[in-house]
Image (tube, rainbow, N blue to C red):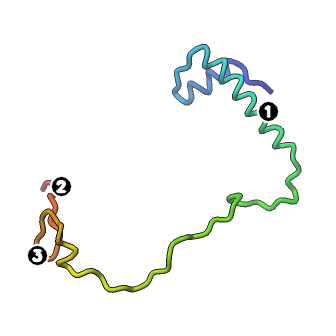
């Protein structure tokens, strides 16, 4: 079912898009093709296919946490622009 020019203008208005006359014509054709393709997909028999959240299996690729000794404080703060005791000193971001 092809979209009408008015429907495309309505969609553009909902999306707060200003379209030129050429864009209205182009989007009318493109959106109609997309809807026709979706209709073809609706015609497929998917009874034997179980619902899924995603098509490919995703695995967590993070490494296991391993306790390791940390760097010495002097080495960590060696290149700090400013420090105060054993901490980085930064400019305040909130005024009181």
Residue at image location 19% in from the left, 55% down from the top: 93
Instruction: Between label 1 and label 2, give the one nearer the viewer.
Output: 1
Coordinates of residue 83 in the picture (x, y in percent): 12, 69
Label 3 element class: loop
First in sequence, mark 1 or 2: give its number: 1
Instruction: Between label 3 and label 2, give the one nearer the viewer.
Output: 3
Q: Please identify the quarter of the rendering in which residue 85 is found.
A: bottom left
* Mark 3, residue position: 85
Please give the label number shown on residue 83.
none
* Mark 2, residue position: 94
Q: Is residue 59 left or right of residue 89?
A: right
Instruction: Between label 3 and label 1, give the one nearer the viewer.
Output: 3
Q: Residues within 10 Å of mark 3 (few under 14, many from 20)?
A: few
Label 2 element class: loop
Residue at image location 20% in from the left, 79% down from the top: 73
Coordinates of residue 71 in the picture (x, y in percent): 27, 80
First in sequence, mark 3 or 1: give its number: 1
* Contact between labelled residues 2 and 3, with CB atoms less than 8 Å apart: no
Coordinates of residue 13 in the picture (x, y in percent): 56, 24
Can you say whether 60 is above or below 26 in the image? Answer: below
* Mark 1, residue position: 36
């Amino acid at each position: 079912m092809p979209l009408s020019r008015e429907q495309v203008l309505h969609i553009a208005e909902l999306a707060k898009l200003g379209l030129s006359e050429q864009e209205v014509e182009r989007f009318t054709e493109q959106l109609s093709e997309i809807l026709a393709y979706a209709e073809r997909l609706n015609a497929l028999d998917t009874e034997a296919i179980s619902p899924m959240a995603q098509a490919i299996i995703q695995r967590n690729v993070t490494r296991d946490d391993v306790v390791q000794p940390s760097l010495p404080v002097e080495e960590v703060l060696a290149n700090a622009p400013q420090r105060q005791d054993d901490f980085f000193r930064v400019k305040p971001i909130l005024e009181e």
